[in-house]
Amino acid sequence: MQTAALEIQGLAKSYTVGFWRKTLKPALLPLHLSVEEGETFGFLGPNGAGKTTTLKILMGIVFPTTGSATILGRHFLDPEVKRQIGFLPEQPYFYDYLSAPELLDYYAQLSGMSSDERRARIPALLERVGLGDVGKKQLRKFSKGMLQRAGIAQAIVHDPKIVFLDEPMSGLDPIGRREIRELIQGLKDEGKTVFFSTHILTDAEALCDRVAVIDKGELKGIGVVEDLTSKRADKSEVVWQGAHALASVGNLLSDIHVTGNIVRGTVANESSDLLLEKLRHQRARLISVNPLHGTLEDYFLSHVSIAEPAKVKA
Amino acid sequence: MTSRLAAIAYNTFREAVRDRVLYNLVFFVLLLVASAPLFGQISIGLERLILINIGLSAISILGIIIAIFIGIGLVFKEIEKKTLYTILSRPVRRWEFITGKYLGLVMTLVVNSAFMTLGFYLALLWVSRGLGKTDAGLLIAIYFIILEFFIVTAITLLFSSFSTPIFSAIFAFALFVIGTFSEDLRNFAALSHGVTKWLFSATAYLVPNFSALNVISQAAHGRAISGKLVLFNTLYALLYSAAATAAAVLIFERRNLK
């Protein structure tokens, strides 16, 4: 039987708050999650949902209040496990007095790589993340996109089996986002397990095999992206030419838009045959019928609480 | 383990070396030492004595300043800037991180002291028109100053493992000042009675004994320093530093790095 790459068993975290530090504020409610090897898993949620807390626990940066987790079958804090994982924190800062090769060499050393391995891997890796020509330039002179690519490089310098990325696209311009997306796609193609948190849903939709949605520290839903997005495929969008037909089919439609002689509307799947027959009868010219899939955004919005918009003073 | 410790220590050293503030401090001490002969012109015949006192005191004070001001940020900066996250996600134990940081700063201070010592001896050579046997004895005073750095760095690291940089600096500097007068505390305890005696004795033994490590005056007057004191001070500094670093590790091991 294949071992899960990541198995989270009831991990929870509460912080003490208040002057006397006696009040417990939960940051993460007991979380149960399993990620298979080779999977690209998206951990979605609005800011402050508990995504970073989960990752911090898994990386051994904060300790869980309760629960445990295994990574590749071993306890998540086992040093042996840490040889197999790579991590990119949210909006990372790296030692800006170092050059990219020095940074990678430092992290590779910490991961236990020999000097021969480091010499062979680092130049190739810099090339792969598009930093092959940076030479001895210090990181303080890097752009945000370059820093993020250096960040991905440090996360995979030791060729880990699982890569954890915390909001890898946040704060990047569209070009930077595309570059990082391509790097993640590359990791996926290599067969690595990628676990990344994000609140940018299009990225999750484009890259992930499965996603989990978390809000206010609580897991709201989990599933295969296609399943989650096709849950609303019980309706179709119909477009035709011939506005005169609207009078006889209007009762079957919702969301009707008329532009000149072109009509666009939504029909329930059980009424679509009847609609098409009536349109044919009315000699309207059918342009298209498309099943309506829900987007990941629809799923996300239906599972997280949306904060009330701030009131603007007049 | 050794390679991880060495990597963290070397990176700490590299950061300090690439920090321009450090160069300014070194420049300052070299300038001070170079200007010492001018003080000698004011007090004719005492150039050598003044040079040794000012030179060694400058090496000591500037080293302490470097130890405290870099030491307070050693852990705090890594948490604040999240660089620690990428370190702890690797097979690095928390004690290795603390010990590596400690060794890196100590290494920085030793290298700095070596440069300052070189400047100091050049100034001494110029003032004395040659170096005598007693001048070699000054190296023991410098060695004791380095032992002071071992302790101050460990104490600063201990405070910075649970406190903010400002409070760490205040605590470490206060402890350095109290430790400098630890001999007086002992003398005061000897003259006291009851609770006061107990309180002052406990404080005197708890704070680092920097009085015993300060032999600048003896060295300046060419008085010999016993091998027993060298041995005792070495053991004392190593044990005190190890205890303070171990305490820092114990605190850091349990800390949630939010």
Image (cartoon, rainbow, N blue to C red):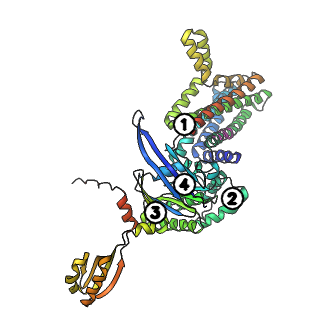
* Disc 3 packing (10 Å; few <14; some 14–19; many ≥20): some
Q: CA distance from mark 3 to mark 2?
A: 39 Å
* Disc 4 packing (10 Å; few <14; some 14–19; many ≥20): many
Residue pointed to by mark 4: A7
Name the quadrant of the C terminus of chain A.
Answer: bottom left
Kindly identify which chain the residue marked by label 2 belongs to.
A
Which residue range is magenta in the image?
B105-112
Kindly identify which chain the residue marked by label 1 belongs to.
B
Between discs 3 and 2, the one toward the N terminus:
2
| Figure check: B197 above or below A281 | above
In contact (CB < 8 Å): disc 4 and disc 3: no
Same subunit under labels 4 and 3? yes
| Label 2 vs label 4, nearer the camera | 4
Between discs 2 and 4, the one toward the N terminus:
4
SS type, badge 4? strand
Same subunit under labels 3 and 1? no
Check disc 1 and give the amino acid type.
Answer: Ser
**What number is the disc on residue A194?**
none
Kindly identify which chain the residue marked by label 3 belongs to.
A
Give the residue drawn at x 69%, y 35%: B120
Check disc 2 and give the amino acid type.
Answer: Arg
In contact (CB < 8 Å): disc 3 and disc 2: no
Query: Residue extending furthest left?
Result: A247
Give the residue drawn at x 58%, y 27%: B176
| Label 4 vs label 1, nearer the camera | 4
Residue pointed to by mark 3: A223
**What number is the disc on residue B160?**
1
Residue B38 in sight from this viewpoint:
no
